[in-house]
Amino acid sequence: MLISRGFGLAKNVAVIATRKLPKTVVQTRNSGHSYMYRDVKEAPRKDVWMAEISTGIMWWWVLWHMWHDWGHIVGEFDYPDPSKWTNEELGIPPDDVDL
């Protein structure tokens, strides 16, 4: 059964492979600008430089504040020492209680 389905699948793949694909279509929209279907234009160098500079500034800002103001991430209060907590605070019943 799988072999018979495989032949049909191979025939369909061969038909699809022989079809010609449509070329890139340039359409004019109502706004007057051109629309390129499946056409990727390279970004201008100015835009690439601006993206690199703004990304660098953003990472500098993040890393600077993580180094100098790390209290924003971990909290501004000291973490309590768990060895000083009592059994009552931890919810541990006294030893003389029968369960």
Image: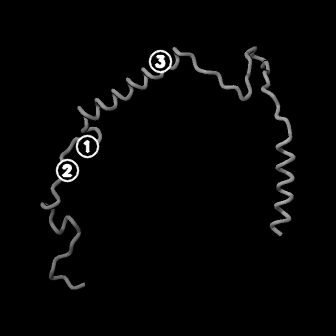
Tag in front: 3 or 1:
3
Q: Name the residue under label 1.
A: 75
Q: Mark 2 points at which residue?
A: 79
Q: Position of residue 50 (x, y in %)?
A: 47, 18
Q: What element carries label 3?
A: helix
Q: What element carries label 1?
A: loop
Q: Position of residue 39 (x, y in %)?
A: 70, 26
Mark on residue 8? Answer: none
* Closest to the observer, 15 or 24: 15
Other-residue count near label 3 (Cα within 10 Å), few / some / many at <14 / 14–19 / ≥20: few
Q: What element carries label 2?
A: loop
The kind of residue tagged 3 is: Trp
The kind of residue tagged 1 is: Gly
Count of numbered labels shown in the rendering? 3
* Closest to the observer, 12 or 94: 12
Give the residue displayed 74% in from the left and 16% down from the top.
Answer: 31
Give the residue displayed 23% in from the left and 32% down from the top.
Answer: 68
N-terminal label among 3 and 1: 3
N-terminal label among 3 and 2: 3
Q: Position of residue 82 (x, y in %)?
A: 17, 59
Colour logic: one colour
Q: Where is residue 36 in the image (x, y as percent from the top left)?
A: 73, 23
Give the residue displayed 19% in from the left and 64% down from the top.
Answer: 89
The kind of residue tagged 2 is: Tyr
Mark 1 touches mark 2? (CB < 8 Å): yes
What is the distance, in whole Å, between disc 3 and disc 1 at their CAs? 36 Å
Q: Mark 3 points at which residue?
A: 49
